[in-house]
Image (cartoon, grey):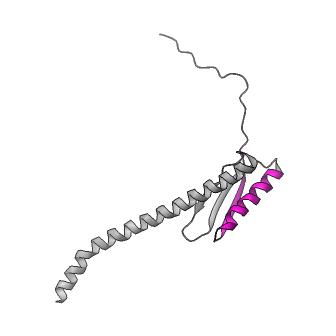
Amino acid sequence: MLTSLVVGLFMGLPILVVVLLLELAAWRGRVRAAAIERQITLTDAIAGELGPVVAPVVRKGLWGPWRIEVAVPWARAATVGRVVAIAHEVFSRGRGRYELVVTPQEERSVARGPIAAPRLRAA
């Protein structure tokens, strides 16, 4: 009797492991979908009010709070303040904590004049 119970447990163990791995993958998919949904909501809220000035990135850690990373133009203080306020409005609606990381945007360099294409010479 005990032998058949042990054999049954060992035969069922691979099935249990596969089921647990599938549940883990489904949970990770739900967390990722929620992060994408929140990122789209935040991006739409900022773009709706200020235009396409920033591109926030939203992530969720295993046990930590939501993490919002936004590169903002430091030279425009009003824009920075408004982006922070919009992020707070969007994330204070949902339950849970969030962490807002604000970094300076890289300045875009404007090329002066046309870029010369390399010339190929026949040998």
- Return the x and y of residue 12 as percentages of the image width and height: 26, 75
Is residue 17 a member of the stretch shown in magenta? no
Residue 123 pos. (x, y %): 47, 10
Q: Residue furthest front?
A: 48
In the image, 45 versus 81, the foreground residue is 45
Q: Residue at x 75, y 55 (%)?
A: 83
Quadrant occupied by the N terminus: bottom left
Identity of the residue drawn at 66% across and 49% down: 55
Rendering coords of residue 68 (x, y %): 65, 59
Dividing the picture into quarters, in which one does residue 91 lie?
bottom right
Query: Where is residue 115 shown, x and y percent of the image?
Result: 65, 23
Residue at image x 56%, y 56%?
36
Q: Residue furthest bottom?
A: 1
- Nearer to us in this view, 94 or 19: 94
Does residue 81 show up magenta in the picture?
A: yes
Q: How many marks?
A: 0
In the image: residue 64, left or right of residue 4: right
- Tell me which residue sits at (33%, 71%) in the image: 17
Left or right placement of residue 86 versus residue 36 in this view: right
Which residue occupies the foreground of this view, 120 or 57?
A: 57
The magenta segment:
78-106
Is 23 placed left or right of 34 in the picture? left
The vertical placement of 83 against 19, above or below, is above
Q: Nearer the viewer, residue 27 or 5?
A: 27
